[in-house]
Image: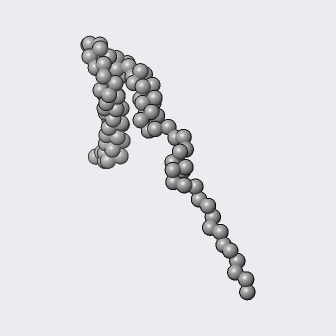
Amino acid sequence: MTEQETTPQQQPAPEEALKTEIPAPEDVEADDSEEKEEEIDLNHLFPDAETDLNELFPEPEMRSLLKKVRRNTKDLGKMKERFSESFSEPDSD
């Protein structure tokens, strides 16, 4: 019987596998956040405010937070209405 030589499959070295070009998460987040930050107009979100909210809150992080708070407040109001409608008992007097 003859012995067959088996050759192990060559796998790329770990260093070569890490060389793939993938943008760093910070770069992607920075690009997205910069676009979102420029778009946030607090005066539009809170039209009843007496002062210029964009001037009062110049930090992009704070503007983003206030936008999320406003959106969550609206969502909570809608949910409250739905729950009150679904749990209200019709008067049968």
Task: Please give the name of the residue rendered at 41% of the width and 21% of the height, measured from the top-left corner.
Answer: 38
The answer to whether residue 78 of the structure is visible from this angle is yes
Q: How is the image coloured?
A: one colour
Relative to 58, say whether 27 is above or below.
Answer: below
Relative to 73, say whether 82 is above or below.
Answer: below
Outermost residue toward the right? 1
- Relative image position of residue 27 (x, y in whole percent): 45, 33
- Relative image position of residue 33 (x, y in whole percent): 41, 29
Q: Is residue 82 left or right of residue 23?
A: left
Task: Please give the name of the residue rendered at 50% of the width and 37% of the height, measured from the top-left corner.
Answer: 23
The answer to whether residue 90 of the structure is visible from this angle is no
Task: Please give the name of the residue rendered at 63% of the width and 64% of the height, measured from the top-left corner.
Answer: 9
Task: Please give the name of the residue rendered at 55% of the width and 49% of the height, measured from the top-left corner.
Answer: 16
Relative to 92, say whether 49 is above or below.
Answer: above
Q: Is residue 62 left or right of residue 40?
A: left
> Toward the viewer: 65 or 17?
17
Q: Is residue 12 left or right of residue 28?
A: right
- Relative image position of residue 91 (x, y in whole percent): 30, 45
Relative to 87, say whether 36 is above or below.
Answer: above
Quarter-of-image position of residue 6: bottom right
Placement of the N terminus among the 4 image quadrants:
bottom right
Outermost residue toward the bottom? 1
Quarter-of-image position of residue 60: top left
> Toward the viewer: 67 or 30?
30
> Toward the viewer: 84 or 45?
45
Q: How many marks?
A: 0
